[in-house]
Image (cartoon, rainbow, N blue to C red):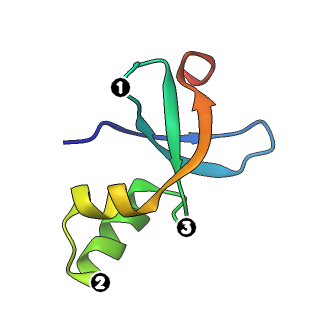
Amino acid sequence: MARLVQFQDPSGRRYVGRVNRDGDSLAILRGVNSIYALAREAARTGKGLESLVQELTGMENADYNRIV
């Protein structure tokens, strides 16, 4: 199962990120701004969380160490 992190940038915008294999960065998920919204989307579409996370993983990354 993917490790997920919900976080805010300095302006207050919320994101959900999947911890990358290196453990130092997050791949930001497109189209969701909370883990709750991700779960609701999975329920709405009938998709499993893992497959939805893979589908929504974008190319944008964030530095995990700067967030925690």
Q: In the rendered image, which residue does mark 1 sit on?
A: 21
- Disc with the residue nearer the chain's start (2 vs 3): 3
Tally the marks.
3
Q: Is residue 25 above or below residue 40?
A: above
Q: In the rendered image, which residue does mark 3 sit on?
A: 31
x, y percent for residue 39: 31, 65
Q: Nearer the viewer, mark 2 or mark 1?
A: 1
x, y percent for residue 56: 44, 61
Q: Is residue 31 above or below residue 15?
A: below
Outermost right residue:
11
Q: Residue at x 73, y 46 (%)?
A: 12
Q: Marks 1 and 3: in contact by CB < 8 Å?
A: no
Q: Residue at x 40, y 55 (%)?
A: 35
Which amino acid type corresponds to the residue marked 3 in the rendered image?
A: Gly
Which amino acid type corresponds to the residue marked 2 in the rendered image?
A: Arg
- Disc with the residue nearer the chain's start (3 vs 1): 1
Q: In the rendered image, which residue does mark 2 sit on?
A: 44
Q: Residue at x 24, y 77 (%)?
A: 43
